[in-house]
Image (tube, grey):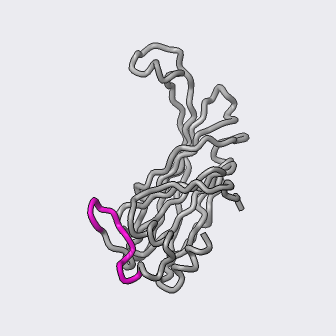
Amino acid sequence: MGELNASLSDIVPNNSVAFRGEWGASTRRTYQRESQVGSGAGPFVEVVDVRWSGALTCSVPIVAVAFLLTPKALFWSKSAPASASQSVCLSLHAYAEYSLQRATFTTSIGGAHLPGIPVAVEGELRQACTLGASHQTTGHIARLACIDEVVLLVLILPGSVVKVGRNRLWHIRNDLAPHLPPHIHDLLTRRRSGIVRPEPPLPMS
């Protein structure tokens, strides 16, 4: 991540970005097993849903690359095209009957969805998730949330350094791409999403 920050420092303007939102919670009944779906018959279980809904906002249009760092892999996905606001959603889902010791953590940034990851929790779900700073900056990797050993990171870029291609997929401008290291060049110029499985597993610090 440090190499990515360094490669962008000379080509990406620094713009202030606000990171704000709020928590909400609800409960619902659902089937105990997948084989029951559509049957209307029990047994049922109660699920607790805790959701943080907010946005990254800036005085200039921005795009984002969302990264989900786990002990076994790094997932990444690109946001929608540049806008002054990119939505952020963090969700925790747990079975109430199981004392909330395990939950599923799901995230999205600007329509960039990342896989749900099982996490260990203690106590209230929303208190188990640590949020990042309310003020971020374009051109730098920032930590938005952390729970258990899972970390949500984001790279925010001003819309002025990217171009939108086919299927609303953005990429860094052609005149800036040669300044990037090869593996970072591929991430910012080609696919919409991907996964990196390092060996040994990624350190969490």
Q: How many discs mark residues in the rendered view?
A: 0
Left or right: where 195 falls relative to 62: right
Q: Which residues are the magenta region?
A: 165-176
Q: Is residue 141 above or below residue 69?
A: below
* Residue 173 is one of the magenta-drawn residues: yes
Image vertical order of residue 186 relative to residue 33, above or below = below
Relative depth, front residue between 8 and 184: 184
Measured along the vertical axis of the image, is residue 156 above or below residue 145? below
Q: Considering depth in this image, is 55 or 121 the residue closer to the camera?
A: 121
- Whole-percent x and y of residue 22? 54, 53
* Magenta stretch holds residue 45: no
Left/right of residue 135 with respect to residue 34 in the rendered view: right
Task: State which quadrant residue 188 falls in.
Answer: bottom left
Image spot of residue 178 (x, y percent)? 43, 81
Residue 126, image x, y percentages: 63, 46
Q: Quadrant of residue 59 in the image?
A: bottom left
Closer to the camera, 125 or 38?
38
